[in-house]
Every structure is written in structure tokens, then in C-alpha cells.
Amino acid sequence: MLRLPETVYLQMVAHCLDGLPLEACGLLAGVPTEDHGDETAAVCYPTANAAASARVYTVEPRDFLRADRDAQGQGLEILSVFHSHTHTDAYPSPTDVAQAPDPGWHYVLVSLRDVVPVVRCYRIVDGNITEEQVVLE
Amino acid sequence: MSVVRVPTVLRAATGGQATVKASGATVGEVFDDLVEQYPSLRPQVLDDDGALHRHLNVFLNDDDIRYIGRLDAKVGDEDTITLMPAVAGGAA
């Protein structure tokens, strides 16, 4: 389960909308738990999409470094990456699965295909996708 | 000795440690010492030819080593090397 405070949710979705027509991405940080089963994204770090593409994204490494340092300074860790799908469902693509770097992370997809953004969250472990609950707080 | 910051995804190889120490005058030498101390880290940081793994980003203090000589970048004793997984994907 990933808990999203309203401010984090709004910041994340706004960054995805700002990124149109390209895919947008960012990182979420919080206090990690042992099994990552119930975590709260306390801070949102919008990052540049270094791929500058409507079909793929790469979190700008320097933005990742900054986010990681800031999170560490607050006693937090990066727990999650989010990105938008501009014309498809909020479901991980084969590219997302192949390149998922950390089995402990929550992979948040923001679909902008319809008028109202759709936010869903997944765990990706050894290529297996499991949807998990997103709780807005 | 330089400080090497290890991302969560690689910490299984360092016994759960978020920071470890390794010595060397270049990033490549620090990596040699690092993988000697933590052998299971090797396939995750270097490829079969001993080059930097393509899904890993490495910063020497604030600098991405791809722009300052990669594994040949010079390292000082007080420097911090940060390992970060490349984070990518997309609808394609």
C-alpha cells in the first residue's frame, strides 16, 4: 500500500500535466518499512525527463542525486518513482518492467489518456507486476 | 579512503550498509577495492569487460563521472562516490 498525502498527490499529477505532450517523471520519498507493505510518500521530487520523449522516460540522474541527498537529510529514503503515460493506461509497459531498478519501490503510473488523470501503483519484482492500493490522505 | 554511498537496491551486496569505505586514486581503483570487499556487487556495477554497468549512474561528489573521465576520474581521500540506479521506462 502506498499512502499519498493530498499535497504530494497534487504535486505529482500537476508535474505530469505540466510535462505534456511528453512523459513526465519524479521520485517520492518517505520512511521505509521492513517489507515496504505500507509506506507513506511524504515528499514529492519532480524530476526532468532526460529522454524528453512522449514514449519513454529517464529520471535525470542529477535530479535523482539532489532528491536522494535531500531525502537523506530529512531521514527519508526514495521509495517510489512515478511517471506519466500520455496516451495509454496506468499499467506498467514491458519497458517499465524491464527497467524497474528496485524491487522494494512502488511504481506509480499516472495516465493522462482521459480527461481525469488516473493514478495506480504497482510493485515489480523479478518481472512480476502486482497492483497495490493507493490511499489518498 | 573514499566514502561510497550505496542505493537500497545494491545493499544486499554490502550487508545492508548504506555507506561503505573504499580506497583508490581513481574511480576505477575505488571500484576494484569495492568489489574485492563485496564481490557480489561486481556484476551490478561493472559489465563483463570491466566497464561501468550501463544501468548505473555514478557521481563523484557533484559530478557525473561520464563527463569527467568515467573510471579514470581522479578521486581524493575526502571524496564521496554515489552509486545510483538508472531509473527509466515509459509507455513505448
Image (spheres, coloured by chain):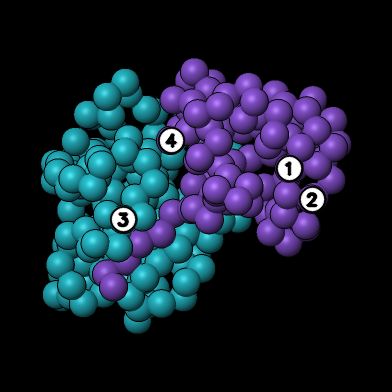
Q: Earlier along the polypeptide chain: callout 4 or callout 2? A: 4
Task: Return the chain for callout 2.
Answer: B
Measure the C-alpha gap from mark 1 to mark 3: 28 Å
The image shows residue A135, relative to residue B55, as above or below, that is above
Disc with the residue nearer the chain's start (1 vs 2) = 1
Q: The purple chain is which one?
A: B
Query: Looking at numbered disc 2 in the image, what kind of residue is underneath it?
Result: Asp
Q: Please check whether the numbered discs 4 and 1 fall on a single chain.
A: yes
Q: Which residue is drawn at 39% across and 28% down?
A: A31
Judge whether A111 appears above or below B29 on screen: below
Residue under the image location 62 percent in, 30 percent down? B35
Q: Position of residue A135 (x, y in %)?
A: 17, 41
Q: Which residue carries the number 1 mark?
A: B28
State the CA–CA distance, disc 1 to disc 2.
Answer: 6 Å
Q: Nearer the viewer, residue A51 or A115?
A: A51
Residue to which mark 4 is pinned: B9
Which residue is tagged 2?
B72
Numbered label attached to residue A98: 3
Q: Nearer the viewer, mark 4 or mark 3?
A: 3
Q: Is residue A18 visible?
A: no
Where disc 3 sits, the SS reads helix
Quarter occupied by residue A73? top right
> Residue A34: x percent and y percent?
31, 21
The foreground one among A116 and A113 is A113
